[in-house]
Every structure is written in structure tokens, then in C-alpha cells.
């Protein structure tokens, strides 16, 4: 079998051409029915015999689409998702350092300080990576994949010219070259100190296609003018720039002492749309930390240190 694009010889059962990166389209052979008449189960797929070819099922495709530059993408997986992009020749996408998971041989990678020294200093101040990475497809169609770092959802943002979206810090994955990634500073001191994500969020501006990763399941609300939603800090994943973000102190002495919701709640005031995440990474980290051995435990103890209070509180 040979490549339809460059006529190079392909390895048996190859998914894409290792010379030019063009995906290989093959017609799937029909699955022979079993003697019992039942469909093939997952146990049948993994129960291969000695010497047989190992065929694992492809992950589920939960979304697909196309960008303005002609790139095509598909989002695969359910809990730990990844976005796989088919990049046309001479087209470029960019991401933060360390974001790429895999790519075909014809993808050229270039690391640079996006936005010059000014952009690098702003990212350093916010705790982001100073460097950005550009990926360009050369000599044919290229394939590149980006994986989520946390259980949740990958969301494609197909933005028009000048359209903006405000996202939580570290949510940006990758984008077309026409997209602008910048920092968004909260104007109010209260929102910066107690808003759960600090002063700095990420602002993504179109035109173009960008991908962000959000934690857990995603819930969307559309707020009318002056309509307000109160949210536990950290659950704010993304919102339109028309929405006003602030914080307010929880009212009531008993609520503060015994409510368990902290001192502050985030307030989102419309008009505009907001997207909330059900499992912020910080909340999961705090929950796990409750069961870790304390740092002050004696190294000479004969057994593991168990927090009995947390054990019986469940």
C-alpha cells in the first residue's frame, strides 16, 4: 500500500504516512458474527491469542470541526480527553511550553518568546511559561495531538474577529496563529485576593479557533442584564467579557463559622454567558491532602500515619 499524497510506501496498518503525514483512510473489514450471534464485546477485543495481532479499540470521538485556516480537529475520550488536529501544509498553531503530546514527523517545532520581552515578562509575572511553541506543518498534511492535564472537558472556541473569552488560568491548550492570547487582570482588589484564581486570568481574542481545558463537567448559564449568580470560588471556568466578576463576604455569623463555604463567594453579574466547572483542580487537591501523612510525623514510627479524624468523618 502506498500514500495517496507522496506515493511513499506505507507500513502495514499505518494510520498516517511517516514521510508527509497524510492520514491513511482504509475501509474497515466487517466483523464476522460469532457463533452465539452476540456482538463483539470489550472482553473479546482485549482477549487476543498468542501470536495474533493486537487491536485496541479507538477512543470515542465526542466532537469534531474545522478552523478558519483549514485545520480539522477531533476531540477524543470522555474523562481524560485529547484533541487531535490535522494541520494543512504551511499552517501553524501555537501552544504553551510542554503542551504537545504527539505529532507527525513533518511538523516543525519552534520555541520563542511570544510577544517579545513585554509578553514574556507578563507571563513570568503571572506564573506562566515565558516561552511559547509554534508548530508548522511542512510538505503535506500534519497530525498533532494535545492532551488534557486533568479529568474534564476540552472546549473548542471558534471566535470571530475581536470576539473575546475570559478563562481560568492554565486553561489554554493551543490555537490557530490568528488568535491572540493575553493576560486578563481583575480590576477590583477583592476579586483578585479572594476570587479563587488570583488577579490574573487568560484572555483569548479572535479571529480563529482555540482550545481550552476545563475541570470536571461544565454547566452553562446565560445571565440577563444585572442578573447575578453566586458561585463558590474556583468553580468559575470561563465567561464572556460583558460579565462583571467580583467577590462578596458570606453573610451571617453562623454561616461563616459553621457553613463550611469559606468567607467569600464569587459573584457574576450579567449580561453574558458563564461556564462553571464541577471539579476544580484545587478542590480535588485539598480533598486528597486530608488523607496524606502530616509533614510533622516522626520518621521513626513503625507504621503509616493515619488521620483518624478524617477517616471517621466520612
Image (tube, rainbow, N blue to C red):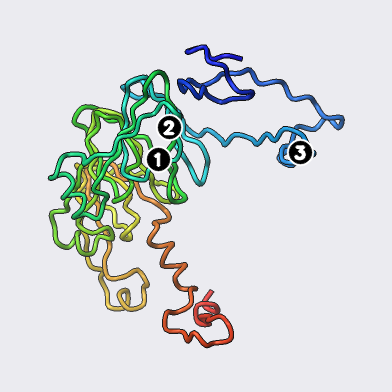
Residue named by callout 3: 48
Look at the picture and state if 34 lies above or below 89.
Answer: below
Q: Residue 188: where, in percent of width, then height? A: 13, 57
Could you give the CA–CA distance between mark 2 and mark 1, rounded to whole angstroms? 7 Å
Q: What residue lies at 28% left-to-right and 60% top-to-bottom? A: 196
Is the C-beta separation of discs 2 and 1 under 8 Å? yes
Q: 251 or 150: which is nearer to us?
A: 150
Graded by Cα atoms within 10 Å as few (under 14), some (14 to 19) or many (20 or more), the crowding at tag 2 reads: many
**Residue for badge 1:** 100
Judge left or right: residue 65 versus residue 234: right
Q: Nearer the viewer, residue 196 or 211?
A: 211
- The reply to whether callout 3 and callout 1 are in contact (CB within 8 Å) is no
In the figure, 288 relative to 236: above or below?
below
Residue 97: percent from left, percent from top = 32, 45
The span from disc 3 to disc 2 (Cα, nearest Å) is 30 Å
Where is mark 2, residue-wise? 144
Q: Quadrant of residue 1?
A: top right
First in sequence: mark 3 or mark 1?
3
- Measured from the top left, where is residue 266 in percent x and y? 26, 58
Q: Earlier in the sequence, mark 3 or mark 2?
A: 3
Spatial separation of the CA atoms under disc 3 and disc 1: 32 Å
SS assignment at label 1: strand
Which class describes the residues within 10 Å of circle 1: few (<14), some (14-19), or many (20+)?
Answer: some
| Element type at mark 3 | loop
Assign the C terminus to one quadrant of the image.
Answer: bottom right
Task: Give the image quarter of residue 98.
Answer: top left
Which of the marked residues, 2 or 1, is nearer the chain's N terminus? 1
The residue depicted at 43 percent of the width and 45 percent of the height is: 148
Q: Marks 2 and 3: in contact by CB < 8 Å? A: no
Per the rendering, the mark at residue 42 is none
The percent position of residue 123, horizontal first and vertical second, equals: 21, 49
* Relative side of 24 to 219, left or right: right
Amino acid at each position: 500500500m502506498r500514500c495517496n499524497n507522496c506515493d511513499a510506501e506505507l507500513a502495514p496498518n499505518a494510520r498516517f504516512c511517516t514521510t508527509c503525514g497524510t492520514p491513511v483512510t482504509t475501509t474497515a473489514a466487517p466483523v464476522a458474527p460469532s457463533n452465539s450471534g452476540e456482538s463483539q464485546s470489550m472482553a473479546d477485543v482485549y482477549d487476543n491469542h498468542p501470536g495474533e495481532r493486537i487491536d485496541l479499540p479507538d477512543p470515542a470521538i465526542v466532537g469534531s470541526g474545522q478552523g478558519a485556516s483549514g485545520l480539522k480537529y477531533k476531540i477524543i475520550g470522555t474523562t481524560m480527553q485529547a484533541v487531535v488536529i490535522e494541520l494543512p501544509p504551511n499552517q501553524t498553531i501555537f501552544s504553551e511550553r510542554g503542551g504537545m503530546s504527539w505529532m507527525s514527523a513533518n511538523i516543525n517545532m519552534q520555541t520563542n518568546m511570544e510577544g517579545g520581552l513585554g509578553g514574556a515578562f507578563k507571563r513570568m509575572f503571572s506564573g506562566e511559561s515565558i516561552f511559547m511553541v509554534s508548530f508548522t506543518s511542512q510538505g503535506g498534511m500534519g497530525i498533532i495531538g494535545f492532551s488534557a492535564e486533568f479529568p474534564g472537558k476540552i472546549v473548542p472556541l471558534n471566535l470571530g474577529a475581536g470576539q473575546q473569552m475570559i478563562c481560568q488560568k492554565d486553561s489554554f491548550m493551543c490555537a490557530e496563529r490568528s488568535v491572540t492570547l493575553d493576560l486578563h487582570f481583575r480590576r477590583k482588589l477583592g476579586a483578585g485576593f479572594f476570587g479563587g484564581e488570583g488577579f490574573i486570568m487568560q484572555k483569548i481574542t479572535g479571529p480563529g479557533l482555540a482550545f481550552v481545558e476545563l475541570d470536571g463537567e461544565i454547566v452553562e448559564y446565560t445571565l440577563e442584564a444585572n442578573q447575578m449568580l453566586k458561585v463558590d470560588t474556583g468553580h468559575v471556568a470561563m465567561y464572556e467579557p460583558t460579565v462583571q466578576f467580583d467577590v462578596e463576604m458570606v453573610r451571617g455569623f453562623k454561616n461563616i463559622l459553621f457553613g463550611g463555604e469559606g468567607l467569600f463567594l464569587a459573584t457574576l453579574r450579567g449580561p453574558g454567558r458563564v461556564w462553571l466547572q464541577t471539579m476544580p483542580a484545587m478542590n480535588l487537591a485539598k480533598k486528597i491532602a486530608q488523607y496524606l501523612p502530616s509533614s510533622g510525623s516522626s520518621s521513626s514510627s513503625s507504621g503509616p500515619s493515619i488521620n483518624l479524624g478524617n477517616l471517621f468523618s466520612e
